[in-house]
Image: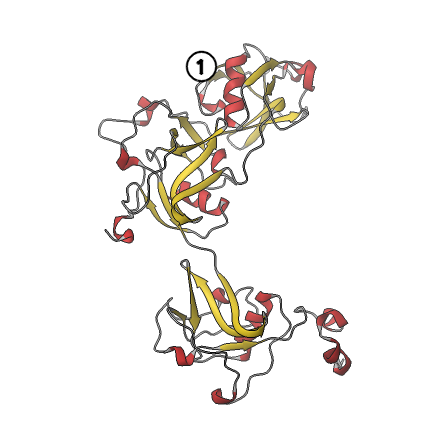
Amino acid sequence: MDLRLCLLLYFGEGPSGVEAADLGVSSSYSEVRLVGGPHRCAGRVEVRLDGHWGTVCDDGWDLDDVAVVCRQLGCGPALKSLTSKVYGPGSESDPVLMMDVQCQGTEAALGNCSYTDPGYLCQHDEDAGAHCQAVELPTPPVRLVGNNTRCSGQVEIYYDGRWGAVCGLGWDLTDAKVLCRELGCGSPRYVTHHCSKLSRSSAPVLLGQLDCTGREASLTQCQAQAWEGRHCPHHRDTGVMCQEPFALQLVNGPSKCSGRLEVWYDGVWGTVCDDDWSETNAQVVCRELGCGPAEPLAPKLQDRPRFGQGTGKIWLDDIRCKGTEKTLQNCAHRFWSYHDCTHREDISVVCQMGPYCMDRQERESPMCHTPSQAEQMRIKS
């Protein structure tokens, strides 16, 4: 089966008869952190509810509650439940948000546990603390496996001190956007719940019912349910294809600043057609590569330098840059891979070797030019 044919947009439709309430999903979105301790896995407990950070009252606070905090933070086992006498009280400007927390110890996040709103019944001299075994998180604590590229595959997340898969119940485009951004990839192109070309993760399913708002910096900050030991059929595997990050290079030339222009798109290198190519386009390329300004273009195409023909994809044609773009992909152009060219028309670019400088003060610095160019440079008022 072609990979693209089996990648379907999937918006979290559960199996028949299963509602969110049956799965115990909390309606409150929560993040948690430990503050004032010797490392990230020990300190005063602070939680973010409905966009506001605050502390947790130590009334009823016990080791089961600490276990959930430790798991949510990716730390080791819970060691101690503590009071404010150990890590100090929270800021008076922050509210006490939770009291009488009652976790079973298996929840994925502190916000999934039952608790009461303390109102004015609890002050900061009763702020709860937690001490977990210190564990360093992998960076990033998420990955995509099974497709030989970091930007597509089955989702795995580091949780409870180990790598685990994610059940696709609740997995949707918003969750995928958080993941792709965290991995440094582009926007999600496909969200999958089954694809034969993606190898299944061999890790145990540890999480399900992920619920991201889209604003999170990491998938680990999204609301989720602990899922180990619960049923998750194969067709609910969670996968995603993020757009590969754009890149460009100059090849077959004497240096990284001279050569045939190639761009990286959709995981494949391809060339650029010389139709309507301008010096303004070349300046954008040189700046993006960190080279010096582009050499002036000869009026006739046959007089311009060429560094051989490419093979495979011709990605771009009819590019029209304004000159202010930070990257070539932001310039106007035809749809990707739409062109009327052959590789005989592959464009080459020659930039000066010095770093690219934008304003006049920078241009006057010898650092912006090679020594021979600096000697000839004359900046007029």
Q: Can residue 114 be seen?
A: yes
Can you give x and y, in whole percent of width and height, for residue 125 in the image?
A: 67, 14
Apparent side of residue 366 relative to residue 232 in the rendered image (left or right):
right
Nearest to the observer: residue 362 or residue 366: 366
Can you give x and y, in whole percent of width and height, for residue 260 in the image?
A: 50, 74
Can you give x and y, in whole percent of width and height, for residue 274 in the image?
A: 45, 79
User: Which class describes the residues within 10 Å of circle 1: few (<14), some (14-19), or many (20+)?
Assistant: some
Quadrant where the image shows the C terminus: bottom right
At x 40% / y 49%, what residue is drawn?
A: 148
**Amino acid type of disc 1?**
Gln
Can you give x and y, in whole percent of width and height, for residue 318 in the image?
A: 42, 76
Q: Residue 82, relative to residue 178: is it above or below?
A: above
**Picture colour scheme:** secondary structure
Q: Residue 373, relative to residue 86: is it above or below?
A: below
At x 49% / y 41%, what residue is drawn?
A: 215
Question: What residue is pinned by disc 1?
Answer: 104
At x 30% / y 29%, what residue is drawn?
A: 232
Q: Residue 272, relative to residue 137: is it above or below?
A: below
